[in-house]
Image (spheres, rainbow, N blue to C red):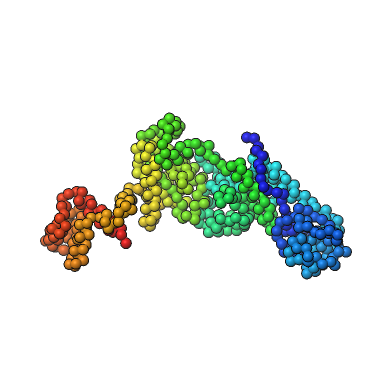
Amino acid sequence: MQSVYIEHPLKRYLLNMQVLADELEARQQDHVFHNRNETPTLTGIRFYRRSQRPQEQYVYLILPEDMDRDFRSYENVHFIVFGRTDLHNFSFSSSILSMSEDCDPLDVYNGLQQIFEKYNLWSKTLQWALQSQTPLIKMLEVSRDIFENPMFIHDTDFYILACPRWVEGMLHWEKEPRTGRDMVPLELINEFKLDQEYLGTLVERRVAMFSAAIRGYRILYANLWNGDRYDGRVCVDELERPLRKSDYLHLTYLSEMLALSLSHQKLLWRSLDSDLDRFLVQALDGSNMDYQDQQAHLRYLSWNVNDTYIVLKITPESAQMGNITPAGLFGYIEAQITEGRALLYRQDIAVVVNLTAAQTTTAAILSSLAYILREGLFRMGVSTELTNFADLHDGYTQASVALQCGKSSGSMLWYYHFEDYALDYLLDCGRRQIQPRLLGSEKLRRLQAYDAENNTELYHTLEVYLQLERNVVQTAKTLFIHRSTLFYRLDRIRKLVELDLEKEAERLYLQLSFLLNRMEP
């Protein structure tokens, strides 16, 4: 892979006074810092001269003989002074570094010049790393002397994109079964889904600090954005030195470079099987596929068109967890299902399972996924068994319907089978075209009207009678009436609405009508 030059808008790294103060403290050089402006504007240091008006891109070193001057007119200009100083002589937009009066101004000047050179070199080295064959790793490597802590980058699926140095105390990465790539342990990902602090970090646009609540040490992080799309995160683990205020500025600059690399070179991992995933996406979409292309992909999978398939749709239990659904889960799923293929489809996880090739059953598949989905706080819709590969589109629709109906029902199960909700789906489809009260049997509406006028219970009697499959004894017992009373009511119903309960189709329509009426508020 050849390196590709990346045109980018990033300019040289601009420092603020906090960076200088933190560097002086790290060098154990006595100073007092008056931080009144954190905007990064500085590119170098100059000696103050009365004949020259100061510029915002420089910090000015004031010699003792000039300390009696009034500097209030110099807004957003920062200064270095010696000994005690009166802050009222400076603008409120000026930050001041006060050095000991025993310091040699020339030594201070040279020391601060070295700080500027250090960060200027870092900026240039990052620009060089951006053009390398492994830019993410290189940029973290050249940033080691800046942060003096271990760093890593993960993508939206918690795959580790770069971690050039591991130290004791850091996470031990897991090998994802399908690809062998390093990723954040699934157990920790599941913890994140329940941690409100972590969920809140997913929309953060600025560098921020993650508390030690989960890992036992603080983590400085920056989300990597491509416009409005979250592409991953760079993290600095506080394991080797305490994090400083200036690290926020450093990580802001570094994260811009990393995001640029991800955007231009598309370094987010793409599966070696992405072509196969596209093939399955076409099948789930119901798109017309070239016959030869379909056969080639099925041969690669060792599948046949007329094998028996099921389709699963998996979604996070909470919409708030949508951003942390790990693609690594695909590998865990496929490790449990030898002839299953998991992929990201329409922002959820779709799984196509060939039951014939796996020599298994739907029940066995559901049992094998129970632990992963329960622990991962996912819900799943399950299609009926499909006897043709061309039916995958309808199978995904079934799984989607089952998932939606199951979640709406308030069921505590972690999966929902389409067959359990097919009748509700059929009735719901009819209700979208015709008002429910008009979709059901007119004869039942007439019975309801008669009951209302005459204070009778013919409607309820017929409903129970059909529910109990026309069993006279059980119906009379359920209604707490004598059998002769039941016969009278049934005869009355037949005469009022001209029913023929010997016809199977009529009984079925009546039962569906009762269901429609119960579905109404």
Q: How many marks?
A: 0
Residue 97 in view (yes/no): no
Relative to 110, 34 lies left or right: left
Q: Quadrant of residue 3?
A: top right
In depth, the one of 45 and 329 nearer the eye is 45
In depth, the one of 52 and 330 nearer the eye is 52
Residue 293 in view (yes/no): yes
Indicate the quadrant containing the C terminus: top left, top right, bottom left or bottom right: bottom left
Q: Residue at x 41, y 49 (%)?
A: 380
Residue 287 position within the rendered picture, expressed as x and y whole percent measured from the top left: 42, 39
Q: Quadrant of residue 107?
A: bottom right
In depth, the one of 297 and 198 nearer the eye is 297
Residue 21 position within the rendered picture, expressed as x and y whole percent measured from the top left: 75, 59
Q: Residue at x 53, y 42 (%)?
A: 176
State whether residue 381 is above or below residue 200: above
Q: Residue at x 43, y 30 (%)?
A: 292
Relative to 496, 208 lies left or right: right
Residue 96 position within the rendered picture, expressed as x and y whole percent measured from the top left: 77, 63
Residue 129 position within the rendered picture, expressed as x and y whole percent measured from the top left: 68, 42
Q: Residue at x 21, y 63 (%)?
A: 449
State whether residue 25 is above or below residue 134: below
Indicate the quadrant containing the N terminus: top left, top right, bottom left or bottom right: top right
Relative to 379, 59 lies left or right: right
Relative to 513, 360 lies left or right: right
